Image: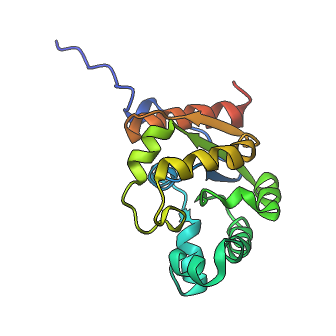
Amino acid sequence: MTAEPEPSATDSSTRPVFILPKTVALVGLMGVGKTTIGKRLADHFGLPFVDADEEIEKAAGMTVADIFANYGEKGFRDGEQRVIARLLDGEPRILATGGGALTHPLTRERLKAKAITLWLKTDLKVLARRVANRPHRPLLKDRNPMDVLKEHVKTRYPLYEMADVTVDTGDQSHVKSLDQVLSALHAYVTGGQ
């Protein structure tokens, strides 16, 4: 008789099963994994995944970089606020927001009222490595990624700290990060039970 192997920490059968009462909005700095982890989270719950930046591009008929070039960051944030407001209506989903989404007061207000906000956080050195040489990120154009990230820590971390759930993912696999996120969400949704 052979013994059955114990399930690994990444085996989906060991992950908590629960229902999300509303949309989960992932927030955090660029490069933290909002899209990658968001897609895996959506698969786990059988929910749609939506990337706010992609929806903004569809609505505007141009890339995020072109929106920044033509309308500046303020114009982009105003459009982003309208798109996120639309995405928060309806059935629960997993929503990856842009790194600066919470800088707009109406976006913050709507996310707080209509979503579970989840801050994905990791070390700046890890983020700088991940976003280096990414031309599609307009805030990094002709700038040192670490300098930009340090500026964002000062202005955005106080906003991210308002999130309902925080998960420090470190520099590990997305599978392990997903396990951490699921555990944190489960504790939040069930009140730690």
In-image side of 161 versus 5 (left or right)? right
Colouring chosen for the image of the structure: rainbow
Q: Check the picture and name the quadrant holding the C terminus.
A: top right
User: In the picture shown, does residue 173 fall above or below 134?
Assistant: above
User: In the picture shown, does residue 188 fall above or below 35?
Assistant: above
Q: State the image coordinates of residue 96 (x, y, percent, origin top left).
A: 57, 58
Q: Give 105 or 58, whichever is nearer the viewer.
A: 105
Q: Give 182 or 173, whichever is nearer the viewer.
A: 173
Q: State the image coordinates of residue 117 (x, y, percent, origin top left).
A: 69, 48
Q: Which residue is drawn at 44% across and 46% down?
A: 128
Residue 29 visible: yes
Q: Residue at x 73, y 70 (%)?
A: 81
Residue 44 visible: no
Q: Check the picture and name the quadrant holding the N terminus.
A: top left
In-image side of 84 versus 129 (left or right)? right
- Among the 4 quarters of the image, the one containing residue 74: bottom right
Residue furthest to the bottom: 61
Q: State the image coordinates of residue 105 (x, y, percent, origin top left).
A: 82, 60
Q: Residue at x 70, y 34 (%)?
A: 188
Q: State the image coordinates of residue 75 (x, y, percent, origin top left).
A: 70, 77
- Among the 4 quarters of the image, the one containing residue 57: bottom right
In-image side of 22 versus 69 (left or right)? right
- Among the 4 quarters of the image, the one containing residue 192: top right
Q: Residue at x 66, y 30 (%)?
A: 187
